[in-house]
Image: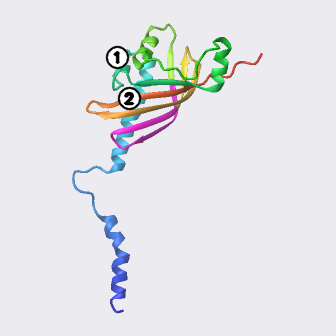
Amino acid sequence: MKFLPLVLACLLSYPAFVEAAPEPAGTTSAVAADEAATTQIRAVIEAFRTAIINRDQPAFERLFLHEHITWQPVTGDAALQRIRQKSPTAQKLKVDANRTPYSFIAGIVASKNSSEETFDNVKIDTDGDLASVVFDYAFLSNGKETNHGKEAWHLLRTQDGWKIASVVWSVNLKPAPAN
């Protein structure tokens, strides 16, 4: 029993020793690494946005792991009903191997209309080498929204920096004007 106060004192002080232990020299904390990765990923998002506005095809293409990544939209139910009024055989999801980020930016560059994509509610989850980004988007042509929805990217940190490895998004249309 006379050792009980000594044992209790040691046990109660143990957390202080554990918390005060310094990180090994030359290591970066996980929080700092995540913050750096998040900052770099936000720069990729901004480069994507500005490449569309500036019709900068080479800058846009450099953001991707390669041309043939997954680049896939899915049409929302309400939008699909509206589209089917004009095209009854329209599909909710159509896989098209010719639809790539490179064909997307080429279409923007060739268009007479100005284009912009906006991003809201951006959420980034990363371990420093792999990242998932999800956000609300709106696509604008000549300053007017053509569609909006959710968009999700997967990115990989390569020797050349962060590269987009897949892009999927939902397509929703603004409600039709009331007559």
Residue type at tag 1: Pro
Q: What residue is rendered at 52% in x and 10% in y?
A: 113
Q: Mark 2: which secondary structure?
A: strand
Q: Mark 1: which secondary structure?
A: helix
Residue behind mark 2:
164
Q: In which quarter of the image is the N terminus?
A: bottom left
Q: Residue placed farthest to the bottom in the image? A: 2
The rendered magenta stretch, by its main secondary structure, is classed as: strand
Q: In this view, does 49 lie above or below 12?
A: above
In this rendering, position of residue 28 left or right of residue 177: left
Q: In this view, does 29 lie above or below 9?
A: above
Q: Quadrant of residue 65?
A: top left
Q: In which quarter of the image is residue 98?
A: top left
Q: In which quarter of the image is the C terminus?
A: top right
Q: Quadrant of residue 11?
A: bottom left
Residue behind mark 1:
58
Q: Estimate the spatial distance between the alpha carbons at disc 2 and disc 1, rounded to whole Å.
A: 15 Å
Q: In this view, does 103 lie above or below 15?
A: above
Q: What residue is rendered at 41% in x and 29% in y?
A: 166
Q: Position of residue 91 (x, y in %)?
A: 58, 19
* Category of crowding for the residue at label 1, using alpha-carbon neighbours closer than 10 angstroms: few (below 14), some (14–19), many (at least 20): few
Magenta segment boundaries in residue numbering = 118-135
Is 89 one of the magenta-colored residues? no
